[in-house]
Amino acid sequence: MPALPPIRLGINVDHVATVRNARGGKHPDPLKAAEIAIAAGADGITAHLREDRRHIVDDDVVRLKAHIKRPLNLEMAATPEMVAIARRLRPHAACIVPERRAERTTEGGLDVAGQREALRAAVGQLAGADIRVSLFIAAEPAQIEAAAAIGAPVIEIHTGAWCDAVVAGDGAGAAAEFDRIARGAALAAKAGLEVHAGHGLDFITAERIASLPEIVELNIGHFLIGEAVFEGLGDAVRHMRAAMDRGRARAAGRAP
Ligand code: PXP
């Protein structure tokens, strides 16, 4: 059997902005994080412009679109404001996500089956601006069928419940969730949808889910930004130590 093409990795830089916004100002910059992620092998960058702008802000998406050398995937609610922003910005892709309780299914993804007409209109408006639209849904047959029926070319399967079960050590729950995802991915691919997945993935769950052949892209954020603190903190401290030591060397011979 021929090898499948590599699974694409989209890096979500929202939580770089979360850290920046804790102080205001410009540091750390999600654009710099995006450029580092791309240099390290990311195939695309994802940013979620929330209605309350709690992490990524409008200027971030403008700068990401202008400067990154890989596709930008804008996560957004299906509101008139966000659709207008996306149509102006023209990211490569837009992933429609629920932001309010009423838009969610019990599993946490978008309730496509319950709001077909509103979502069909948003998908059409985004597609009309040449944006590839995905819908972030639970791996539920009713949601998958509704996504295909309203003309979305892509779905992103919500992996949060599975990842939570894995982290909690709930073997039976994790097996049931993984099975649901695998069946959903197969059903979606059969319906002609491109299948992505994301939410809560870490090294272990990303390796496991990459074994599902229908899934062509993973979008990963929170775990990696957290891991970057551990993998990068030692170097940052060494850099600071060296800067302080250089400064101190210039004080030689000067009495306190
Ligand atoms: N995919 C979608 C649609 C999301 O909303 C998120 C969270 O912003 C992710 C992927 C990434 O999830 P995490 O930050 O848990 O890796």
Image (spheres, helix red, strand yellow):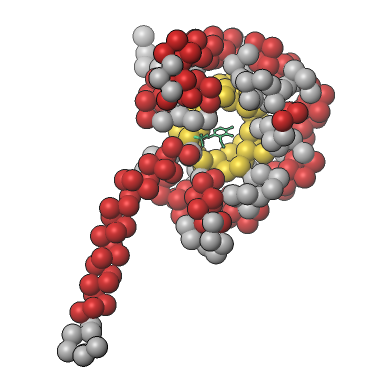
Q: Is residue 11 above or below residue 214?
A: below
Residue at 55% across / 64% down in the picture?
25
Q: Is residue 255 visible?
A: yes
Where is residue 116, by image quadrant?
top right
**Horizontal and vertical percent position of residue 32:** 46, 54
> Observer-nearest residue: 225 or 122?
225
Q: Describe residue 164's horizontal placement relative to residue 187 as left or right.
A: left
Residue at 25% across / 60% down in the picture?
238
> Observer-nearest residue: 128 or 198?
198
Q: In the rendered picture of this protein, how many numbered marks are placed on residues?
A: 0
**Horizontal and vertical percent position of residue 22:** 54, 56
Where is residue 108, by image quadrant?
top right
**Horizontal and vertical percent position of residue 2:** 37, 13
Q: Describe residue 92's horizontal placement relative to residue 35 as left or right.
A: right
In which quadrant will I find the N terminus? top left
Residue at 66% across / 32% down in the picture?
97
Q: Describe residue 91's horizontal placement relative to residue 212 as left or right.
A: right
Q: Extreme left residue here?
A: 253
Q: Describe residue 106's horizontal placement relative to residue 24 as left or right.
A: right
In which quadrant will I find the C terminus? bottom left
> Observer-nearest residue: 11 or 254?
254
Q: Is residue 123 visible?
A: no
Residue at 69% across / 36% down in the picture?
99
**Horizontal and vertical percent position of residue 252:** 18, 85
